[in-house]
DNA sequence: CAGTGGTCTAGACCACACT
DNA sequence: GTGTGGTCTAGACCACTGC
């Protein structure tokens, strides 16, 4: 092919995307759309690089670069010889993908799975700060959950969650309790909501009386306050989570680079 | 070229590296060696992709993939039209690359630079835990620094640092005080030590009397304890830093993906 | 203008997984 | 063996920087 139209802004079949950008970015956007729309579900394989190249009328190398970026963002997982798969929270080895609390001694594995106890699960109305975090309006319906995570029978994490009411219609304490595995896996399979990215703000605080009682610590114990906002595709906030972590036997682990 | 030797384990000029690995990984290793040895200094440009391709007798694309990874690890910075540069801490816009504490309201910029106060700077001997963190032996000489960082004239961070004695011979409180800019920039320019990666363990604690006094807080105030180990190339630990952060007006910000 | 990184293509071959 | 992702090459052209 000697007349190569390449990546002018009106070149190939592959530009529904508005602004000018490299071809592989446009392809990335198209793949992203298919991920959002649910054309390929979490855990499933997406079409092979050759297939996608044919579909978008570009070379395999261009598709490859698009998928490289999606893979770097953990939206997709490549497996040599098998294919490329939509990332999911429902896998053993990525179980607590967003939980950075680790035991001081021993690995996450040796500690075994957490025991989950649902304390409360009710529908309510978004307060001003919850609404802001979730891009809702004050008073919009939200689902509110409180639970405790224990390791080796020691209550270690107390979490309050707020979920927008609409996408999580039908979520009950019972369904939460019955579900084995990470909460985000349930969100995927039952509600089609896939958490893709999150931000955390961490502070040191003292618990109030109720919080202290639930965690079994003295009221003046210093605890880690971890406020997380989790996002789906499009950077749409889909969960606000306020956690209180005991850090006498665990620590929040972070890697900087 | 139809007889392409490609990446067998004894193929091109580019395999001093022992084990089998893709060619671009071998190239990456060679570039890494040159970075370590100081052949190219922080802030300087490394040779162009074409030059490196010629030097290692591989194609430009292979060098490109090697540099892509180094760039993703923040060891090197690409600038279109200009070249590829060795990453450095001595730049305005990457000033506090490893400091994740942010003001609750307003940006890091609007807050202005931190005021630094050296409280103490002395030579001492590594205790058992310091030695373990820095891969030294107990009793080995270390340099110990204590300082306070203030924002808007409010003492916010109290830091204790331990540095291995040998690489930092000649570091004094005076040189620390006189230096404008990030501490890691001084380490680079004065001692040739380039911090490349770090790990942090975060806990909630109460300060002791002296710590509380230095930060101007009550003794029972909850504070963030941030223990950082910073590494040079080769994953060699070169600094242990224990920070106490006030989180009444700031928070530790982390992005998960 | 020349030099740099950035994008795109086409084709070859390697490593791995399944059947 | 067939099909997948992974590596490597060679050559073309684009976009940015600075002389």
Image (cartoon, coloured by chain):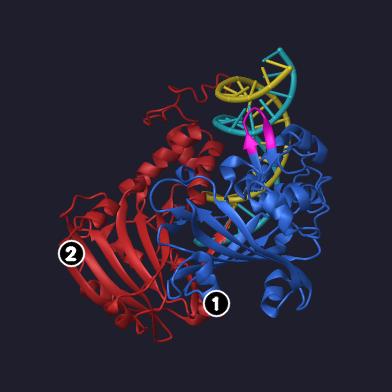
Chain colours: A red, B blue, C cyan, D yellow
* Discs 1, 2: same chain: yes
Q: Chain of mark 1?
A: A
Q: How many marks?
A: 2
Tell me the residue that label 1 is attached to.
Answer: A107
Label at residue B204: none
At numbered mark 2, what does the secondary structure look like: helix, strand or loop? loop
Q: Quadrant of the C terminus of chain A?
A: bottom right
Q: Horizontal placement of A118 versus B84: left or right?
A: left
Of the residues under marks 1 and 2, which one precedes in the sequence?
A: 1
Q: Horizontal placement of A232 versus A92: left or right?
A: left
Tag nearer the camera, 1 or 2: 1
Q: Horizontal placement of B12 versus A35: left or right?
A: right
Q: Chain of mark 2?
A: A
Q: Which residue lies at the image location 67% right of the left edge and 45% below the top edge?
A: B88
Toward the viewer: B43 or B18? Answer: B43
Report if the CB atoms under discs 1 and 2 are less than 8 Å apart.
no
Residue B168 percent coordinates (x, y): 78, 60
In terms of image quadrants, where is residue A147? bottom left
Residue B79 on the magenta segment: yes
What is the magenta range? Answer: B78-84
Residue A78 visible, this orientation:
no
Tell me the residue that label 2 is attached to.
Answer: A170
At numbered mark 1, what does the secondary structure look like: helix, strand or loop? loop
In terms of image quadrants, where is residue A90? bottom left
Residue B36 percent coordinates (x, y): 78, 51
Is A101 located above or below residue A216 in the figure?
above
Q: Tell me if mark 1 has few (under 14), some (14-19) or many (20+) residues whose alpha carbon lies within 10 angstroms of its own.
A: few
Q: Horizontal placement of A56 versus B188: left or right?
A: left
């Amino acid at each position: 092919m000697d007349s190569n139209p390449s990546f002018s802004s009106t070149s190939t079949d592959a530009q529904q995307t508005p602004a000018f950008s490299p071809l592989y970015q446009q392809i990335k956007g198209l793949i992203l759309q298919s991920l959002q729309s649910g054309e390929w579900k979490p855990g499933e394989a997406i079409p092979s690089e050759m297939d996608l190249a044919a579909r978008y009328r570009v070379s395999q190398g261009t598709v490859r670069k698009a998928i490289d970026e999606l893979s770097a963002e953990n939206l997709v997982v490549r497996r040599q010889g098998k294919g490329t798969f939509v990332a999911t929270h429902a896998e053993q080895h990525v179980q607590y993908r967003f939980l950075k609390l680790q035991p001081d001694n021993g690995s996450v594995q040796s500690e075994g799975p957490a025991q989950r106890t649902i304390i409360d699960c009710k529908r309510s109305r978004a307060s001003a700060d919850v609404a802001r975090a979730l891009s809702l309006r004050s008073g919009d319906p939200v689902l509110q959950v409180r639970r405790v995570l224990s390791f080796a029978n020691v209550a270690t994490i107390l979490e309050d969650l707020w979920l927008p009411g609409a996408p999580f219609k039908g979520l009950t304490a019972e369904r939460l309790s019955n579900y084995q595995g990470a909460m985000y896996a349930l969100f995927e399979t039952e509600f089609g909501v896939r958490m893709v990215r999150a931000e955390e703000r961490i502070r040191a605080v003292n618990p109030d009386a109720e919080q202290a009682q639930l965690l079994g610590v003295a009221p003046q114990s210093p605890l880690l306050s971890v406020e997380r906002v989790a996002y789906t595709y499009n950077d749409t906030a889909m969960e606000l989570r306020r956690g209180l972590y005991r850090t006498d036997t665990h620590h929040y682990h972070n890697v900087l680079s």
